[in-house]
Image (cartoon, rainbow, N blue to C red):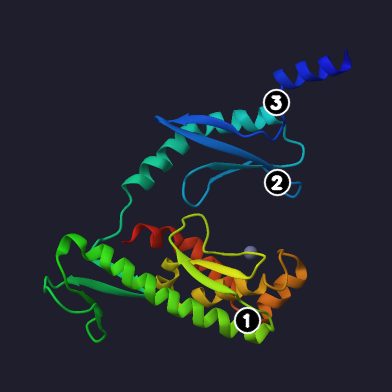
Amino acid sequence: MRGVARFLKNLVRPEPLAPMVIDAGGTSLPVVFRKNANARRLVLRFSRDLSEVRVTMPGRVSRNEAMAFVNKSQGWIEKQLAKRETQTEDPSRVLFRGEEYELVYTGELRGLISIDLPQARILVPGDKAHAPRRLADWMAREAKRELTEASHRRAAEMGVHVSRVSVRDQKSRWGSCSSSGDLSYSWRLIMAPPHVLDYVVVHETAHLRHMNHGPAYWRLVLKHCPNAADAKDWLKANGGKLHRML
Ligand SMILES: [Zn+2]
């Protein structure tokens, strides 16, 4: 009987932190809830790729209160989605190693992508329709070279071993580290200033020693990258922009 009662109770009242799905202007949007004893109030924000809404709940807030808060925020959520969808970057400009360049599609049939430093231009040959794709591939190659070199250098400094370095175009994170020592990065880090790329490399390489974000891990990161906080702030403020270019 008690088992049945508990079953019915769970049917009526779902787990306090079970995710829900809301309809935001025709888009089904998952909402995930997180308890945080240190939070002072309910906070609602988007994941970086806008694929879900995250609600932080202070210790004493109930699921019903959190859901009421989500309902009340519906208008704001829809407005944010609409705003981000129309937000685009100037297609004739691009960031590379933290500097802004004008993109020039030369239309020349042959030749390699080159940088005209004095005039801050990147010259891309080939037909215009495929030029952005070609530029993205070129940047991914540059990123792989730089991230591989930096990862091995940092690993040697920390006395750890890197197996393989790869680059991808994943939206959810800038880097990851597997237990077998493989490091993977977003190639878009090549657009960011060098100290930001370096921080992500230190962050991932340090995981080869500590597979967590504990105090010893952060001590190691800060020892090798004293500006970690600046780099994190830069990514928070500009990360979305990197994903909207190319
Ligand atoms: Zn990490």
**Image-based side of 108 in relation to 93, left or right:** left
Q: Nearer the viewer, mark 3 or mark 1?
A: 1
The label number, if any, that marks residue 40 in the structure image: 2
**Image-based side of 163 in relation to 194, left or right:** right
Give the quadrant of residue 130: bottom left
- SS at circle 3: loop
In the rendered image, the vertical position of residue 9 relative to residue 173, given as above or below: above
Give the quadrant of residue 27: top left
**Residue at 50% across / 78% down in the picture?**
148
**Residue at 24% across / 61% down in the picture?**
91
Q: Residues within 10 Å of mark 1 (few under 14, many from 20)?
A: many
Of 66 and 222, the residue lying toward us? 222
Q: Position of residue 47 (x, y in %)?
A: 52, 48
Label 3, on which residue? Answer: 14
Q: Position of residue 112 (x, y in %)?
A: 22, 79
Q: Earlier along the polypeptide chain: callout 2 or callout 1? A: 2
Q: Earlier along the polypeptide chain: callout 3 or callout 1? A: 3
Type of amino acid under label 1 = Ala
**Residue at 45% across / 61% down in the picture?**
239
The image quadrant where one finds the C terminus is: bottom left
Type of amino acid under label 3 = Pro
Q: CA distance from mark 3 to mark 2?
A: 24 Å
Label 1, on which residue? Answer: 155
Q: Nearer the viewer, mark 3 or mark 2?
A: 3
In the rendered image, the vertical position of residue 85 relative to residue 118, given as above or below: above
Which residue is situated farthest in the top direction here? 1
Q: Residues within 10 Å of mark 2 (few under 14, many from 20)?
A: few
Q: Nearer the viewer, mark 2 or mark 1?
A: 1
**Image-based side of 106 in relation to 137, left or right:** left
Type of amino acid under label 2 = Arg
